[in-house]
Each structure stands twice: as C-alpha cells, then as structure tokens.
Amino acid sequence: METVLIRLANDKLHKNPYLDTSKIYLVIHEGKAFLYGEVDSFFKKQMAQESLRQVEGICEIVNELKVVNELKGKVANELKGMRRPYQLNGRNTVEPATPHLATVTT
C-alpha cells in the first residue's frame, strides 16, 4: 500500500508546474507523508503540500521543507529588465542611480 502511495504522491509532486523536485524528498509511513529538502519560496513549500492533499490515502502531511534563497530570487526578479539601477560613486560604494531630469521652460 505505501509503495502505491509513494508512486501517486511522487507523480503529483512531479506534475506540479511550480516545483523543482530535484531537492524535495518524500517519505510515507502509515499514511503520513513527510516532505524534506529545499525550495526557494514559501509559495513552493505550500504548493508541495497542496499537491499531496490530492492523494487519496495520505491522512497527514508533515512539511519539513526549508525555504532557501527566497530574498535572492525576489531581488533578481525585480532587477530583471532594469537598465542601470545602481552606479558606482567616487568612493567605490554603490548608490541608487539618479534619473536625469529635464527642465521645462515656458
């Protein structure tokens, strides 16, 4: 029975388009599903848990997934498409780039 549950649960995890299952480990014992490993956001942690809720025969889910690099991912996503969000000043430190303002005369 547990072999069937593991196969069904693994299928659900692998079919979830939001999850990279290469760092997710699943253990099932007496109807309890234990999730271990790493994901890069709390959303993905929840998605893994929700995937297992759909498996008939799993009566409890223990989600021990650790969220790593969430801030790094958010910052990278925010910086995509920005041309030059930061510039070096004369003191070799980084500060926000200031936009060039046009003066309007009437």
Image (cartoon, rainbow, N blue to C red):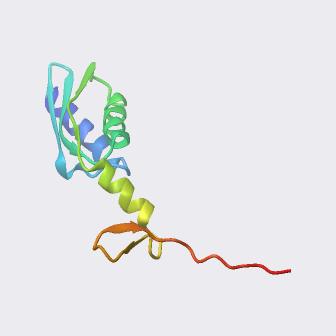
The answer to which of 104 and 38 lies nearer the viewer is: 104
Pick out the residue farthest to the front: 91
Seen from the viewer's position, the closer of residues 104 and 35 is: 104
- Vertically, is 4 above or below 69? above
Residue 69 placement (x, y as % from top left):
26, 50
Q: Residue 76: x, y in percent?
A: 36, 62
Q: In this picture, is 36 found above or below 79?
A: above
Residue at image position (38%, 41%) is 43
Residue 84: percent from left, percent from top: 44, 75
Residue at the image point whose x is 64% and y is 76% from the top: 101
Q: In which quadrant will I find the C terminus?
A: bottom right
Q: Is residue 18 left or right of residue 23?
A: right
Q: Looking at this rendering, what residue extends furthest in the right direction?
A: 106
In the rendered view of the protein, which quadrant contains the N terminus?
top left
The answer to whether residue 21 is left or right of residue 79 is: left
Rendered image quadrant of residue 35:
top left
Total numbered badges shown on the rendered structure: 0
Which residue is at the front of the view, 71 or 56? 71
Residue 17 left/right relative to 21: right
Residue 64, picture quadrant: top left
Give the image location of residue 85, x and y in percent. Answer: 44, 69
Of residue 10 and residue 104, the one placed in the foreground of this image is: 104
78 over 37 or under it: above or below: below
In the depicted structure, whether residue 28 falls above or below residue 47: above
